[in-house]
Image (cartoon, rainbow, N blue to C red):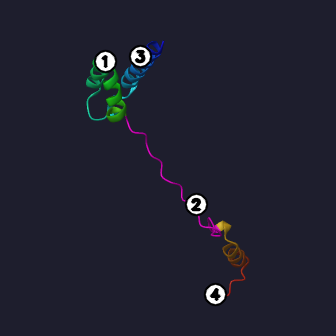
């Protein structure tokens, strides 16, 4: 029974690897051309799938870490009360300069 389960798991991994190689766009494949990856995965099922996962799959794009604004700092000029007060004073003509 354990042999059957291991065999089914290996078959599932092989099919997943093969489907992944076939559906990956040509320009995103790394290290070796796509047709050669297909041959490697088909002819060497377990090892070919493992090598594909480690060396052939495209890398996921990495997002930059978000940098939150500092505490208490205004996010923009319209959030700064001093700026708004000065702007209102200049618009009313109370500017002394």
Question: Along the polypeptide, which appears first: circle 1 or circle 4?
Answer: 1
Is label 3 in a helix, a strand or a loop? helix
Q: How crowded is mark 3: few (under 14 residues within 10 Å), some or many (20 or more)?
A: some
Residue at x-position 68% and y-position 87%: 96
Q: How far, Cα to Cα, is label 1 from label 2?
A: 48 Å
Residue at x-position 25% and y-position 24%: 36
Q: Check disc 3 and report the residue beneath it.
A: 11
What secondary structure do most residues of the magenta stretch adopt?
A: loop
Q: Residue 97 carries which label?
A: 4
Question: Along the polypeptide, which appears first: circle 3 or circle 4?
Answer: 3
Q: In this view, does 66 lie to the left or right of 50?
A: right
Q: Which of marks 1 and 4 is in front?
A: 1
Total numbered circles: 4
Q: Check disc 2 and report the residue beneath it.
A: 68
In this view of the protein, can residue 68 be seen by the observer?
yes
Magenta stretch encompasses residue 54: no
Q: Check disc 1 and report the residue beneath it.
A: 42
Magenta segment, which residues? 58-77
**Residue 60 image position (x, y, % from top left):** 43, 39
Q: How far, Cα to Cα, is label 3 from label 4?
A: 82 Å
Q: Is residue 90 left or right of residue 2?
A: right
């Amino acid at each position: 029974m354990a042999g059957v389960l291991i065999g089914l798991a290996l078959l599932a991994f092989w099919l997943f690897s093969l489907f992944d190689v076939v559906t990956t766009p040509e320009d995103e494949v790394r290290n070796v051309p796509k047709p050669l990856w297909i041959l490697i995965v088909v002819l060497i099922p377990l090892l070919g799938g493992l090598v594909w996962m480690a060396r052939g799959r495209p890398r996921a794009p990495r997002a930059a870490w978000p940098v939150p604004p500092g505490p208490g700092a205004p996010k923009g000029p319209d959030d700064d009360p001093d700026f708004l007060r000065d702007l209102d004073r200049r618009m009313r003509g109370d500017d002394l300069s």
